[in-house]
Amino acid sequence: MGSDKIMLFLGVFAGGISIYFFVSAFIQNNNDKAQLNWANNETPAISKNPIINMSRPLVHQFTLQHALKIKNQNYRKKILRFIKIGGLSSELNEDEFIGLQILWGVMFPLFFSLLNFALQLEIPYLMIFILIPLGFYLPIMHSLGEKKKREVSVRGDLPFFIDLLALSVEAGLEFFSAIQKLIEKAKGTDSVLAQELSIVIHETQMGSSREEALKKMVDRLEMTEITSFIAVILDAQASGAPIARVLKDQSEQIRIERFVRAEKAGEKATQMIMIPIMFCIVPAVFIMILGPVALSFMK
């Protein structure tokens, strides 16, 4: 690609950026509240992903109306699951999620292919075709990435939360009252577990049963530790077993599982370190040792 094509491409790209900022400013000034407010009249939270924040005005202007036409319930259930497990309920709804997939999986590859044809950039169309599944998968990657971060946070906090709950229950507090005290102590932190427990308390205050609120928490986190913990708590409440003893047993079991998981991670690390050793260090050692011998034989 010659210098003239590069200059033309940069000019078109700069023009596209200018149009984007103009459209974004127009949307934000005129239709921002009407478009970004959800059914509960609350503005969505700012996403941790800058690509989603950048794409939101374009989604509401160009692809949201197409996302609303997708009525497949099975597909929408899958999207809702990705939103739940990623903790994205405050920043994205189902229609915006699908709109992001349409924007990056359809509109962006189409725009790029037109740009490639108009400017004769000679980019292989196979590369542009690969952008389609990648664009559709982009919001899902964001959800799965947030899910991994949430799992790390929950696994780190869970044993300590259970210990504090056991101490509070032994001191005479009821189980959900102990959770409320724990949430108050965790205010100002980024604890995912505290946020999930606050959602449980809020749902019970809004009329949901305790069992239903705890099961929804299990669905949002999808972690074996949380699933077993909630199942044991519900069984203990149903059978009348002492909650404090159950909480202590669960805390000990979770610590044992975390220790086993750390051992497996250490074993995996020792296996992974063999790869750079075999491909980088061992060849260098052989060159240093056998190199002079090989040169002497050649002479």
Image (cartoon, rainbow, N blue to C red):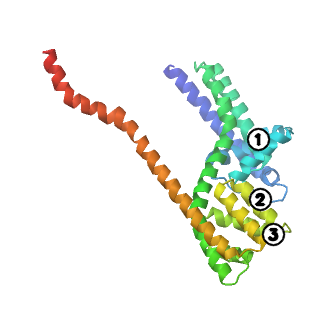
Q: Which residue is mark 1?
A: 98
Rendered view: 212 above or below 73:
below
- Which residue position holds label 3? 204
Specify whether residue 157 is in view.
no
As shown in the figure, which amino acid type bears the numbered disc 3? Answer: Thr
Picture coordinates of residue 21, whole percent (x, y): 67, 43
Quote the CA–CA distance across marks 1 and 2.
23 Å
Q: Which mark is residue 216?
A: 2
Horizontal side of residue 250 vs 175, given as left or right: left
Q: Residues within 10 Å of mark 2 (few under 14, many from 20)?
A: some
Point out the tag, 2 or 3, that comes first from the N-terminus: 3
Q: Specify the quadrant of the image occupied by residue 91.
A: bottom right
Classify 134 as above or below 26.
above
Q: Residue furthest top?
A: 299
Residue at 64% in and 42% down: 141
Mark 1 Cα-neighbour bin, 10 Å: few <14, some 14–19, many ≥20: many
